[in-house]
Amino acid sequence: MTSTVDDAALDAEFVALLATPEGRADPYPRYAVLREATPVFRSSLGSWVVTRYDHCQQVLRVPHFAKSTGADDMARLRRERWGIPAQEMAAFAEFFASRQSMLTLNPPDHTRLRGLVARAFTPSTVERLRPRAVTLCDELVADMADRAGDGAVVDVMAALAFPFPVTVIGELLGVPVADRRQFQDLVRAATTVLEPLSTLEELRASVAARRTMEGYFADLIAERRRVPADDLLSELIAVSDGTDRLTEDEVVITAILLFAAGFETTTNLVGNGLLALVQHPDQLARLRAGAGDARTVQLAVEELLRFDSPVQLDTRVATRAVEIAGRRIPAGDTVMTLIGSANHDPRHFAEPGRFDIGRDEGPPMSFGSGIHYCLGASLARLEAQVCFGRLLETFGSIEQAGEITRRETITLRGVLHLPLRLARA
């Protein structure tokens, strides 16, 4: 597409996608409008928008696009839309810029930090967690089965989608059982900073939640320094590569990232995935029939990730002038990749609107791409495989049984309440 694209004509769809409850609840029709009109356009919201799979890959993989500290991303929009004073917006930007993690760092800092941490999340290391993950999942599913023996309705978000991954990452990192529940609300508040249109109140809540988590992990790290344990937090304190070690601030920031990301994405994956399955009973039956086959479950999880991704968008900043599909992106401009749109691009996925758990067309972009590919992708996949497999072995019937409540967010897409009627097999 050349520069003749009428950006203004597309902007209403894009603004509605981000700014309206209807757009956030079902972004896929608007993705289709944007995607079929152009691979890239300039939005009035202050960023370029990339809509197709191959071009999103280009942005996420090419070194000329870097992560941003968040200091400038849509700051003008937030000021104008919500009346946030420029001075307060600058204070927010400074706060988050001073607390960069692997999520926002660029090489060489990103390379160093990821290299020190990545050994705990290799596919082989994660696979060794499978037996324990099965045990933890079975305990939660058994409790659900006890409650659902007479066909009772269970909110699977509260009963399984949150407690399962938070228990897995909690055990791995070393967060005490009694402390884990508080992080559901804290992480939800903290991650509103990732939303393009977060309000003044949400930004303030995000800062407060982040300070609370920093204080908690600083205390827990101090305890681990006194009495090391067999957990990842103790390993982070001791980790080194020659003379290189994590600083105190880096241990705190990394612990927060690993713990929050360790359950937030998987919680959304389980909720979105179960919703897709109950809304497509033919595919639920198909997965049930093949639940004993590892490859069937693996492919199903990839399709669940693609069909309704837990992460819908990501941003980069051009470090120099770059051309995407005939459009010149000036140095310093923000570029937003619509991951949810890329996962429904018919140029990459055949009949992308069709939910097909046997689809085998390569991985979706739900975990990103390039050097910032999600460190915990293997763990999230393992947990989802275990979760869906154990559910289908335990329950012979899984049906929607009430109103579904979705999160009012677009960057992180998920379900708050998912009531299901369960009958034991």
Image (cartoon, rainbow, N blue to C red):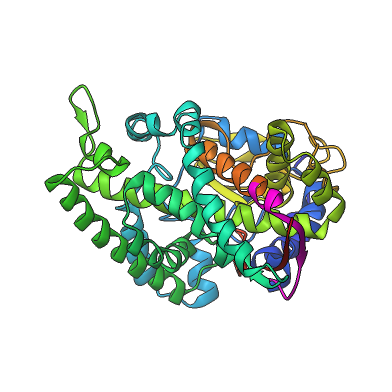
Name which quarter of the figure residue 159 lies in. bottom right
Q: Is residue 213 above or below residue 328?
A: below
Q: Position of residue 78 (x, y in %)?
A: 50, 68
Point out the image quarter for the N terminus: top right
Residue 397 forms part of the magenta stretch: yes
Compared across the picture, whether 227 is left or right of 265 comes to left
Q: Position of residue 398 (x, y in %)?
A: 75, 61
Q: Position of residue 253 (x, y in %)?
A: 31, 49
For the record, the magenta segment spans 390-405
Residue 340 forms part of the magenta stretch: no
Q: Is residue 61 above or below residue 85?
A: above
Point out the image quarter for the C terminus: bottom right
Q: Position of residue 229 (x, y in %)?
A: 23, 43
- Residue sitting nearer the eye, 24 or 415: 415
Name which quarter of the figure residue 246 lies in. top left
Compared across the picture, whether 398 is left or right of 189 comes to right
How many marks the image carries: the answer is 0
Which residue is at 46% across, 29% downward?
A: 122
Compared across the picture, whether 243 is left or right of 25 comes to left
